[in-house]
Image (spheres, rainbow, N blue to C red):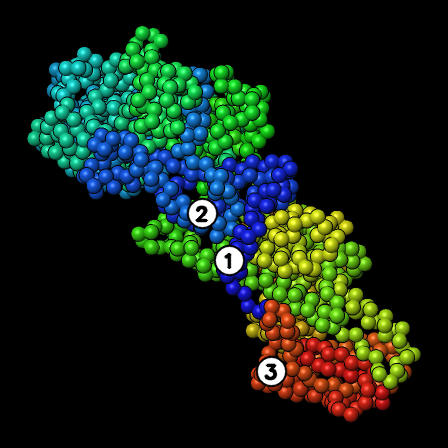
């Protein structure tokens, strides 16, 4: 039984699950139970699972397992996000290596059909790896019935969802300045643009704009020189006061804010300039200036190249005048549109290719990427006398999270879904959902929703679900298609449509109903977040595959109360979703937007958010840096249970960051899993011993506890019921981080308290053996009664331990599915038929989650044992401070407490305290004065300083003068006046101790809260013998009782010291010491026992009035005998007639 290889055992359990088809068997067993709906956010399969995925998978396994064990049917299907940039990046890299092209140029070269074929080929590259790793983690989920966002059924539902929004007038076409990746040639959502910021150096230039018809120059500061060729206006703040200064070196008059002088000059105090006058920003409105470049002058000369006003201009950045390039700045676009410089008929200058290179509209810089062109533009400015000053700035700049290249702001024609009008409804819906942790939902996510902008849902990509919009050439006629059937009906296309990717549908056209010729599909595809946000509907092909769907009814599926919607809403909204903190701007957001638009509700009720798993050094995990251990290797070393428990019992489940440590996983093995296994192992050994001694197999009896009055049995069973009550409450609130802590405490209570304190009871004592000559006849009834009592006590203890283990493995099953099932399968043979009848007991995961047994609750016993534990823990701490092991007997432990109930509670368990701490006397008292307890008080310096400022020093100085009575009064009332100031509990900390003196030198003091203990740490030599004598005498007296003897019966005691017992037959392993070491130990124990009997002879004067001798052959038949373990010494004790 001994040691266990957890990873190896997990592999065995995994094989067992496969043999019995455990996951599907569990689904079959629960098929008639009420549904519990879990939505799994789909990952990409273009990389292998990392710790973030394993964390999310653990949460997504624990909660469905729990609810399935509580009597719910939980369907679990894996999903794949198969579209978007990650896949296209792989193909772009291939094509660049093959033909030297990427992006649009590569697609134009090989054709979109071939491009998408390649995408489809690589999209599930690592699917088998995912399946292996996720299954090895212990997660039960259906990979065979998975959903993929590239499935035609999934894509068709996306069309349907979009069409519902279009019908409601929630879709429009427009241009907006958006974060734009020149590497990916597509705009990004604002949430994507915030994912990766880097510190970069950019040029910072101050440029002059000569006023038309005057001798002054406006100056503007920018870190994007590449936007200057597209300049159409300048913007000033209407309320700011601007200076007109004469710069001596350039002999130019410049207009700027006073704060801008530090931008223009390194040291404004030493600079050569003169302030000529001041002018209010509002007075600058409408001033015209000479443009730097003439590229767009003719097109905009009637409406542009003038000063505009807006309050977005800041005084703490630049020089107080901002140059406006409407195509490359969100505020620039807004202001220019408001002022009529740009309009629907007059688009802003946007002289860039999709890849961010200048077009022929800007001939001097044609073909240059915008970032590369900055240097040449600055040279041009300097050559043409427009550069006032140039420098560099280091700042945080957004980068594309996929290509890792700098983003730009760019006006892009896009399709938008309206979000801003429904913000109040989104916030109302948020209040109807439950978030863990709450602050993520009601703080971070609330703020994100409150600031929602209309959603740019289109992407200029190729591998994705195509927008189902067919438009005329002038974009005036737009048809939104909701299904394959509708497309065929509108187009007259008679062929099969088995795929919905652009290469399969773009050739299909729709005749115009407005005389505009032929309508063609727009070129864009959906933002892949739209697809994942459609998952609650698309994963089940809603509404097309639902009962009562009517293809002839365009409204079929739109109502939640009839048709397909009636059936959807039997499982909608979903009960539970879970993902990482970053999804507040991703999947959580798009789910919420689409659910609110479609059905007026969020599509989920409960949302669990986890934090980010970082490398041990606090940095982001990086394969290139190799700063984290391979997850598969960690599982191979320690097992999945250890990894799961490590991740769940960490700050990351509270949406905080976790620095992953392999040592932490190892600690879970030694600190949690091994003690749990050892608890079962100990039970198994005692069950074997019971059979050896009685010939009977142990069988669990749920009803035997009704006659059990042992306090430790009652405590551990009551604690188990309290645990179940707590777990139910917390799991229903989805607070995993509180549940795990209590479960781990239960393992500790079982191993380090219950088993430790009840080893002798659990091991059982062999009944006194009657003498073969029959001289015991007079005491037969009494002996039999004693033997029955002891046997019943052993059964009570074993039954209690079994019930605790049986309950724990069921409660732990969702968290550590392997070890819990492993132990359960070994416990199952001990279950009676009354428990197993009609149940499939091949796996713990087929059973119901345990429910609390009301008759076993006992809050009084729980309170008493908790207080006993506190005293013992403080006693252990006192011993540790004096480096005294528990083997060293000590004389006195004093427990001081002002609550008499506390003292009375500990008194009821006095024997456990004295035995565990190996002290002879336990003193329980509230009389602090007799022991010279002194009080002192310390200030919370920070608190006092904040509240009382300069008086804090005076208050602190007065504290040592406070009397014990004053401090005790403060403890009772929580308030005290010092130096005229009222202080409260948050300002002060009270300490208790003993005055140092020769009399207290041997007393070790430990204090926690209101409990104070004094341990006499002096080692009195005679105590060891006294303790051993008391234990042996107790055994002798019990032996006399079993033998039916009366006090007047003369007896001689014979003893022998035995080698430690070995138990064979439990998994083929043996317990105890063997060989030479065992004999050395036995001889030492023999010496100790012999000295004890010699020096403590008077203690045995009555129980063995005819003396104590060593057991030898030929001493005659024993009245009774037993083998007993006393203070780690194994003894054979025999009662002999004198």
Tags 2 and 1 in contact by the CB under 8 Å rule?
Answer: no
**Image point 50% across, 42% down: which residue?**
142
Q: Residue furthest top?
A: 515
Residue 11 has which mark? 1
Q: Is residue 200 left or right of residue 358?
A: right
Q: Is residue 628 left or right of residue 991?
A: left
Kind of element beneath mark 3: helix
Kind of element beneath mark 1: helix
Q: Is residue 360 left or right of residue 1058?
A: left
Query: Mark 3 or mark 1, which is nearer the start of the sequence?
Result: 1
Residue 950: % across, % down: 47, 47
Q: Residues within 10 Å of mark 1 (few under 14, many from 20)?
A: some
**Image point 65% across, 82% down: which residue?**
1059
As rendered, which of 158 and 875 lies closer to the eye? 158
Residue 842: % across, % down: 62, 53
* Distance between mark 1 and mark 3 Cα atoms: 36 Å
Tags 3 and 2 in contact by the CB under 8 Å rule?
Answer: no
| Vertical order, 849 against 761 (above or below) | above
Residue 353: % across, % down: 20, 28
Residue 1040: % across, % down: 83, 79
Q: Which residue is mark 2?
A: 131
Q: Which residue is mark 3?
A: 1078
Q: Quadrant location of residue 569?
A: top right
| Vertical order, 587 against 284 (above or below) | below
């Amino acid at each position: 039984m001994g040691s266990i290889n957890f990873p190896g055992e997990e592999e065995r359990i995994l094989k067992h699950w496969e043999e019995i088809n455990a996951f599907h068997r569990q689904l079959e067993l629960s098929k008639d139970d009420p549904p519990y709906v879990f939505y799994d956010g789909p990952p990409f399969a273009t990389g292998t699972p990392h710790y973030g995925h394993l964390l999310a998978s653990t949460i997504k396994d624990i909660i469905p397992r729990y609810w399935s064990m509580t009597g719910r049917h939980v369907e679990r299907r894996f999903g794949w996000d198969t579209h978007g940039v990650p896949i296209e990046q792989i193909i772009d890299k291939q094509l660049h290596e093959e033909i030297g092209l990427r992006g649009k140029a590569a697609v134009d070269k090989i054709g979109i059909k071939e491009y998408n074929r390649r995408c489809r080929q690589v999209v599930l590259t690592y699917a088998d790896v995912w399946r292996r790793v996720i299954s090895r983690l212990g997660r039960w989920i259906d990979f065979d019935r998975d959903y993929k966002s590239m499935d035609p059924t999934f894509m068709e539902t996306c069309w349907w969802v979009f069409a519902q929004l279009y019908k409601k007038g929630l879709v429009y076409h427009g241009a907006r300045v958006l974060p734009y990746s020149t590497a990916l040639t597509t705009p990004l959502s604002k949430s994507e643009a915030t994912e990766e910021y880097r510190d970069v150096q950019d040029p910072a230039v101050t440029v002059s704009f000569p006023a038309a018809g005057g001798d002054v120059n406006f100056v503007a500061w920018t870190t994007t020189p590449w936007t200057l060729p597209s300049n159409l206006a300048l913007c000033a703040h209407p309320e700011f006061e601007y200076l007109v200064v004469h710069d001596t070196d350039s002999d130019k008059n410049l207009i700027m804010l006073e704060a801008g002088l530090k931008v223009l000059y390194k040291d404004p105090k030493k600079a050569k300039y003169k302030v000529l006058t001041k002018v209010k920003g509002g007075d600058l409105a409408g001033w015209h200036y000479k443009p730097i470049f003439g590229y767009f002058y003719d097109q905009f000369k009637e409406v542009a190249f003038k000063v505009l006003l807006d309050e977005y201009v800041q005084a703490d950045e630049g020089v107080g005048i901002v140059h406006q390039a409407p195509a490359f700045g969100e505020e620039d676009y807004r202001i220019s549109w408001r002022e009529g410089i740009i309009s629907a008929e007059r688009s802003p200058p946007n002289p860039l290719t999709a890849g961010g290179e200048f077009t022929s509209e800007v001939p001097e810089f044609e073909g240059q990427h915008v970032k590369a062109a900055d240097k040449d533009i600055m040279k041009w400015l300097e050559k043409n006398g427009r550069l006032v000053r140039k420098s560099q700035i280091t700042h945080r700049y957004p980068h594309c999270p996929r290509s890792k290249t700098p983003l730009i702001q760019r006006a892009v024609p896009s399709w938008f879904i309206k979000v801003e009008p429904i913000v109040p409804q989104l916030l109302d819906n948020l209040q109807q959902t439950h978030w863990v942790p709450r602050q993520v939902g009601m703080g971070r996510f609330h703020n994100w929703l409150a600031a929602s902008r209309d959603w740019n849902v289109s992407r200029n990509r190729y591998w994705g679900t195509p927008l189902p919009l067919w438009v005329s050439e002038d974009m005036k006629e737009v048809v939104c298609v909701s299904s394959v059937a509708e497309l065929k009906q509108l187009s007259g296309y008679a062929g099969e449509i088995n795929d919905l990717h652009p290469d399969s549908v773009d050739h299909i056209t729709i005749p115009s109903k407005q005389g505009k010729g032929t309508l063609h599909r727009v070129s864009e595809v959906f933002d892949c977040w739209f697809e994942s946000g459609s998952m609650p509907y698309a994963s089940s092909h809603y509404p097309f595959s639902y009962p009562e769907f009517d293809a002839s009814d365009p409204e079929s599926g739109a109502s939640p109360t009839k048709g397909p919607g009636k059936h959807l809403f039997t499982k909608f909204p979903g009960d539970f979703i879970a993902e990482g903190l970053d999804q507040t701007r991703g999947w959580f957001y798009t789910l919420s937007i689409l659910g609110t638009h479609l059905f007026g509700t969020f599509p989920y009720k409960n949302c669990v958010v986890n934090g980010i798993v970082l490398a041990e050094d606090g940095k982001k995990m990086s394969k290139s840096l190799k700063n984290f251990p391979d997850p598969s290797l960690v599982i191979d070393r320690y097992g999945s249970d250890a990894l799961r428990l490590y991740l769940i019992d960490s700050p990351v489940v509270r949406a905080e960051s976790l620095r992953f440590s392999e040592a932490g996983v190892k600690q879970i093995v030694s600190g949690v899993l091994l003690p749990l296994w050892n608890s079962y192992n100990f039970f198994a050994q005692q069950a074997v011993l019971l059979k050896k001694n009685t010939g009977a197999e142990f069988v669990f009896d749920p009803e035997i506890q009704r006659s059990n009055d042992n306090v430790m049995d009652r405590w551990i069973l009551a604690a188990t019921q309290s645990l179940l009550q707590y777990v139910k409450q917390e799991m229903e609130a989805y607070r995993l981080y509180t549940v795990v802590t209590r479960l781990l405490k239960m393992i500790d209570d079982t191993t380090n308290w219950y088993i430790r304190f009840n080893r002798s009871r659990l091991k059982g004592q062999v009944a006194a053996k009657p003498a073969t000559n029959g001289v015991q006849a007079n005491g037969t009834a009494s002996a039999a009664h004693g033997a029955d009592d002891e046997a019943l006590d052993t059964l009570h203890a074993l039954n209690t331990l079994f019930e605790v283990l049986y309950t724990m493995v069921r409660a732990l099953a969702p968290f550590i599915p392997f070890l819990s099932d492993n132990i359960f399968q070994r416990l199952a043979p001990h279950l009676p038929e009354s428990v197993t009848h009609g149940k499939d007991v091949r796996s713990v995961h087929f059973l119901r989650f345990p429910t609390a047994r009301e008759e076993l609750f006992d809050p009084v016993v729980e309170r008493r044992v908790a207080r006993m534990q506190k005293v013992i823990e403080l006693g252990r701490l006192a011993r540790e401070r004096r480096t005294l092991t528990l083997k060293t007997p000590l004389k006195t432990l004093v427990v001081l407490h002002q609550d008499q109930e506390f003292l009375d509670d500990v008194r009821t368990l006095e024997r456990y305290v004295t035995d565990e701490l190996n002290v002879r006397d336990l003193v329980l008292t509230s009389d602090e004065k007799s022991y010279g307890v002194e009080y002192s008080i310390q200030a919370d310096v920070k608190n006092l300083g904040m509240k009382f400022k300069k008086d804090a020093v005076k208050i602190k100085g007065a504290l040592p003068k406070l009397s014990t009575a004053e401090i005790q009064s403060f403890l009772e009332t929580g308030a005290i006046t010092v130096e005229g100031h009222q202080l409260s509990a948050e300002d002060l900390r009270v300490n208790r101790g003993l005055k140092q003196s020769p009399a207290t030198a041997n007393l070790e003091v430990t204090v926690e809260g209101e409990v104070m203990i004094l341990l006499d740490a002096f080692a009195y030599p005679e105590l060891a013998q006294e303790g051993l004598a008391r234990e042996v005498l107790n055994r002798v007296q019990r032996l006399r009782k079993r033998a039916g003897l009366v006090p007047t019966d003369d007896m001689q005691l014979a003893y022998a010291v035995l080698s430690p017992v070995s138990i064979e037959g439990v998994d083929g392993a043996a317990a105890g010491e063997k060989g030479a070491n065992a004999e050395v130990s036995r001889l030492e124990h023999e010496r100790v026992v012999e000295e004890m009997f010699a020096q403590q002879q008077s203690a045995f004067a009555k129980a063995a009035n005819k003396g104590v001798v060593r057991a030898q052959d030929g001493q005659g038949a024993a009245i009774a005998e037993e083998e007993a373990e006393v203070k780690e010494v194994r003894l054979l004790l025999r009662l002999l007639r004198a």
